[in-house]
Image (cartoon, rainbow, N blue to C red):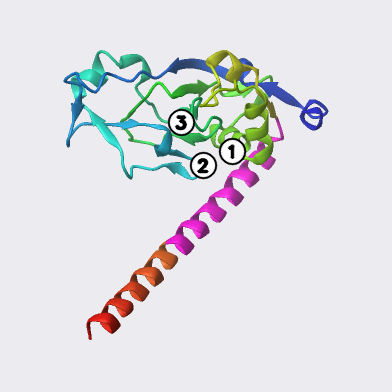
């Protein structure tokens, strides 16, 4: 906290241009769709490496357009988890249509703080660091499920480096995540190959 206060910084509340929480329709209602619907992101779909559509639920397009209109996602929205695994942030890519459950909030940032441009990708990267997560966790309420709320999210401090440094950080993290994805795919392929060998040895 003091480390950040000693640098040029801002609170998220100062930078947020627009913000809304998600909502979760009742499972018993006719809101969900098995396929062809709009992705409805839950906590497990929000990751440091981006939106993960494994095990995603879908809502009907009409629910997305009416009942959940406020929480429709837009390009460069930051989706911030507030319940269950609070403090994880994903950025919404271009041409992505989706909505969020009550366990997250979405917000758009202004382009600048003072005369310094802020990149949403940089803010997401910072909030996903250990320091960023620790800031969130300091505010979480106890109980079975740690939780934040929108007012607390607005109080979070974010360091404000130069535009050049923000761009360098974004580029570096992108490279690391791409490498991590590649290694994960390689590992999954090796495991699948090993399992096939074991099957062949057993069934030979």
* Disc 2 + disc 1, Cβ < 8 Å: yes
The percent position of residue 35, horizontal first and vertical second, equals 17, 37
Q: Callout 3: helix, strand or loop?
A: loop
Q: Which residues are magenta?
A: 160-184
**How many labels were placed on the picture?**
3
Q: CA distance from mark 2 to mark 3?
A: 15 Å
The percent position of residue 133, horizontal first and vertical second, equals 63, 34
**Residue 117 visible somewhere in the drawing:** no
**Dividing the picture into quarters, in which one does residue 26 lie?**
top left
The percent position of residue 56, horizontal first and vertical second, equals 30, 38
Could you say which is closer to the camera, residue 150 or residue 119? 150
**Residue 200 visible somewhere in the drawing:** yes
Q: Earlier in the sequence, mark 1 or mark 3?
A: 3
Above/below status of 179 relative to 39: below
Neighbor class of circle 2 (other Cα within 10 Å; few <14, some 14-19, many 20+) is: some
**Dividing the picture into quarters, in which one does residue 40 lie?**
top left
At x 33%, y 72%, the residue is: 195
For residue 76, which numbered disc appears in the image? 3
């Amino acid at each position: 906290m003091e480390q950040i206060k000693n640098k040029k910084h801002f609170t998220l509340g100062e930078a947020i241009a627009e913000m809304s929480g998600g909502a979760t329709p009742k499972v018993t209602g006719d809101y969900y769709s098995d396929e062809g619907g709009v992705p409805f992101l839950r906590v497990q779909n929000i990751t440091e490496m981006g939106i993960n559509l494994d095990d995603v639920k879908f809502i009907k397009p009409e629910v997305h357009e009416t009942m959940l209109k406020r929480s429709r996602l837009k390009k460069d929205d930051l989706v911030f988890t507030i319940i269950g695994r609070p403090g994880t942030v994903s950025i919404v890519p271009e041409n992505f249509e989706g909505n969020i459950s009550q366990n997250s909030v979405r917000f758009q940032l202004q382009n600048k703080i003072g005369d310094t441009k802020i990149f949403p990708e940089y803010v997401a990267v910072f909030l996903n660091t250990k320091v960023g997560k620790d800031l969130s966790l300091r505010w979480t309420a106890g109980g079975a499920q740690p939780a934040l709320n929108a007012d607390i999210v607005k109080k979070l401090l974010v360091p404000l480096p130069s535009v050049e440094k923000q761009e360098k950080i974004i580029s570096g993290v992108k490279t690391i995540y791409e490498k991590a994805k590649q290694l994960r795919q390689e590992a999954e392929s090796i495991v699948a190959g090993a399992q096939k060998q074991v099957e062949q040895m057993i069934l030979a």
